[in-house]
Image (cartoon, rainbow, N blue to C red):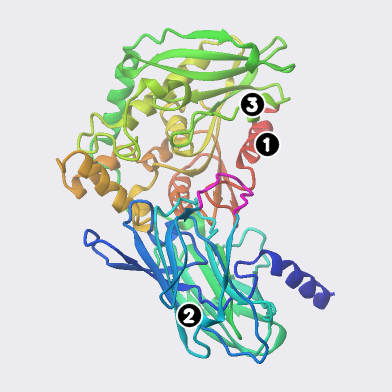
């Protein structure tokens, strides 16, 4: 049975693992920037991982992605193919200084199952040097966001070269280990020739924990990797496994060790509580002027749909979508809070609901229906960097109060069971959820959040290093009126991690170990400060996209808590 399982998996893996057509080009590249404006002139790139995990984004200048590879001389002539999928703008491709193609782009697709079309180019044998180094260089820019899942690949192969495979397997479904002495995984390998497998383990701070090289024989084999003696610290880890036989095949995976022992690296700034108490008092001075208007296009057989309008802090008008069961009675109500820049443009998730539950999808200022209620420029300063040098003008002071006003709205509604008010969201919506559950703790009975933002910002900057580029773009927008450190101090005042200890309700946290945008350490930094009843769920292969349908998981949590 074991042998059959491995063979079946290898056949499946041939179609799914990065590098499935055995690749003569290694995964390690160097991105050399075409600008003197960056501190580091080049960045090492492993094409098994996303741009974002390696500190590269649209803010980086154009660069030359380059490496070398060897093409073995064969008795039989072969057609060589260069196959490229790069989420970037490719200006030009050269092999041994021969121009291949260029001026094409592949844009990011926000989807749990995106389909990217690779570009294939036939490479004449006369362009190649056999049994010696060949150079490939790809001039590119506008490196795309992915949220964590990598879709980049550059392959060079011949029809006469067969496939190898390497796969990382864990016994635990969620790749979570409560004790570092328990950490282990298996490598399932199929090699065309003898060679070696290299395993690299890094923590989320980009520090190497282990490099191991194993000899590999031709054919099928399995290797068990036991990390019990490595004394891994509580945290999050990536695995890179590369098989080098007569070419390159690779795989990646992620795991976590004792995540409930994670702690933030910073302390609440002086004046934090008073700052938010003052904001709440200011909100109370604004008459809410709630208005509700039913919309046929938002109504279904099960629920009536409305547009709600209210005045928030600064006497700014904000809006939301409000869905109420048609039958009479009091019902649980859940506030849905938006991700960064998202305004619930896709309403299918609300129009298909069959449960007797009220939902308010709040468009905080600058988002969706409330887009005109707040003016900023994108990408800089956006909401994150808005008035970075003035803590009293930051966007999140206002956006946070929009969420509290939404709670105020539900408290005025006869159809709402005020003992069953919940709040939920992921990304920015996750950070807003933590804040709302804390600042309106006496009214919130349950909350659910996915990898949150803005949360544990000092750790965020250390892990997602490209935030430093983003911050510099914000400072430049405001003519560097404050220093980088002063900007960080401003950020500290809207770090939702500091709210977590005030949450009093049942809490669910959902995370994806492949999330490069809001890495799991941040959500656990908040989660571990919550003293109320709580639970978490880890999806080891999910990115910031939440491929496993986090909304469905959250609604199942609320259904259990509120019994609807």
Q: Position of residue 71 (x, y in %)?
A: 55, 84
Q: Main secondary structure of the magenta part?
A: loop
Q: In screen coordinates, is 337 left or right of 13? A: left
- Camera-nearest label, 2 or 3: 3
- Report which quarter residue 416 is drawn in: top right
**Residue under circle 2?**
211
Viewer-nearest residue: 380 or 53: 380
Mark 2 vs mark 1: which is more N-terminal? 2
Crowd class of label 1 (few under 14; some 14 to 19; many from 20; radius 10 Å): some
Give the residue displayed 38% in from the left and 54% down from the top: 57
Q: Position of residue 373 (x, y in %)?
A: 37, 20
Q: Secondary structure at mark 1?
A: helix
**Residue under circle 3?**
350
Q: Position of residue 156 (x, y in %)?
A: 57, 74
Q: Secondary structure at mark 3?
A: helix
Q: Which residues are magenta?
A: 106-116
Q: CA distance from mark 3 to mark 1?
A: 15 Å
Residue 486 in view, yes or no: yes
- Camera-nearest label, 3 or 1: 3
Residue 153 lies, with reference to residue 158, above or below; the image says above
Q: Quadrant of the C terminus?
A: top right
Q: Is residue 212 magenta?
A: no
Q: CA distance from mark 2 to mark 1?
A: 41 Å
Q: Quadrant of the N terminus?
A: bottom right
Q: Are marks 2 and 1 in contact (CB under 8 Å)?
A: no
Residue 410 lies, with reference to residue 548, above or below; the image says above
Q: Is residue 114 magenta?
A: yes
Residue 442 in view, yes or no: no
Give the residue displayed 40% in from the left and 60% down from the top: 140
**Residue under circle 1?**
556
């Amino acid at each position: 049975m074991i042998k059959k399982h491995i063979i079946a998996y290898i056949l499946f893996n041939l179609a799914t693992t990065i590098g499935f057509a055995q690749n003569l080009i290694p995964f390690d590249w160097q991105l050399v920037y075409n600008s003197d404006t960056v501190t580091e002139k080049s960045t090492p790139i492993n094409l098994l991982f996303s741009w974002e995990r390696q500190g590269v984004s649209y803010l980086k200048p154009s660069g030359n992605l380059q490496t070398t590879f060897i093409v073995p001389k064969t008795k039989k002539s072969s057609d060589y193919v260069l196959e490229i999928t790069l989420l970037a703008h490719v200006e030009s491709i050269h092999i041994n200084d021969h121009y291949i193609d260029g001026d094409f782009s592949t844009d990011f697709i926000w989807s749990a199952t995106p389909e990217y079309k690779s570009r294939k180019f036939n490479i004449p044998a006369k362009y190649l040097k056999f049994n010696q180094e060949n150079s490939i260089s790809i001039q590119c820019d506008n490196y795309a966001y992915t949220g964590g899942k990598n879709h980049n690949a550059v392959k060079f192969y011949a029809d006469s070269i067969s496939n190898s495979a390497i796969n990382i397997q864990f016994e635990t479904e969620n790749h979570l280990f409560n004790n570092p002495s328990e950490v282990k995984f298996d490598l399932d390998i199929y090699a065309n020739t003898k060679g070696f497998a290299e395993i690299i383990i890094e923590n989320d701070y980009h520090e190497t924990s282990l490099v191991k090289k194993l000899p590999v024989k031709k054919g099928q084999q399995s290797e068990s990797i036991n990390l019990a003696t490595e004394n891994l610290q509580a945290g999050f880890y990536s695995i890179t496994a590369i098989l080098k036989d007569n070419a390159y095949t690779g795989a990646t995976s992620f795991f976590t060790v004792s995540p409930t022992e994670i702690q933030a690296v910073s302390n609440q700034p002086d004046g934090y509580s008073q700052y938010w108490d003052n904001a709440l008092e200011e909100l109370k001075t604004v008459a809410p002027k709630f208005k509700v208007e039913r919309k046929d296009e938002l109504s279904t057989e099960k629920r009536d749909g409305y547009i709600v309008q209210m005045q928030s802090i600064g006497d700014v008008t904000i809006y939301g979508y409000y869905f109420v069961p048609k039958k009479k009675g009091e019902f649980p109500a859940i506030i849905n809070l938006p991700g960064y820049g998202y305004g619930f443009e896709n309403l299918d998730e609300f129009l298909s609901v069959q449960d007797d539950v009220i939902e308010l999808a709040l468009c905080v200022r600058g988002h969706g229906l409330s887009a005109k209620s707040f003016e900023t420029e994108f990408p800089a300063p956006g909401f994150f960097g808005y008035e970075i040098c003035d803590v009293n003008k930051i966007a999140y002071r206002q956006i946070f109060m929009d969420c509290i006003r939404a709670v105020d709205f539900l408290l005025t509604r006869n159809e709402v069971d005020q003992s069953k008010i919940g709040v939920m969201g992921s990304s920015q919506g996750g950070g807003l959820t933590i804040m709302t559950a804390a600042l309106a703790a006496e009214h919130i009975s349950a909350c659910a959040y996915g990898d949150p933002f803005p949360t544990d910002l000092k750790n965020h900057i250390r892990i997602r290093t490209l935030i430093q580029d983003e911050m510099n773009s914000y400072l430049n927008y405001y003519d560097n009126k404050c220093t980088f450190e002063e900007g960080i101090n401003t950020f500290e005042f809207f770090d939702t991690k500091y709210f977590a200890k005030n949450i009093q309700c049942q809490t669910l946290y959902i995370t994806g170990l492949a999330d490069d945008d809001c890495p799991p350490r941040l959500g656990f930094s908040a989660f571990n400060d919550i003293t109320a009843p709580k639970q978490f769920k880890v999806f080891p292969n999910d990115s910031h996209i939440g491929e496993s349908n986090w909304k469905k998981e959250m609604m199942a949590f609320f259904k259990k808590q509120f019994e609807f």
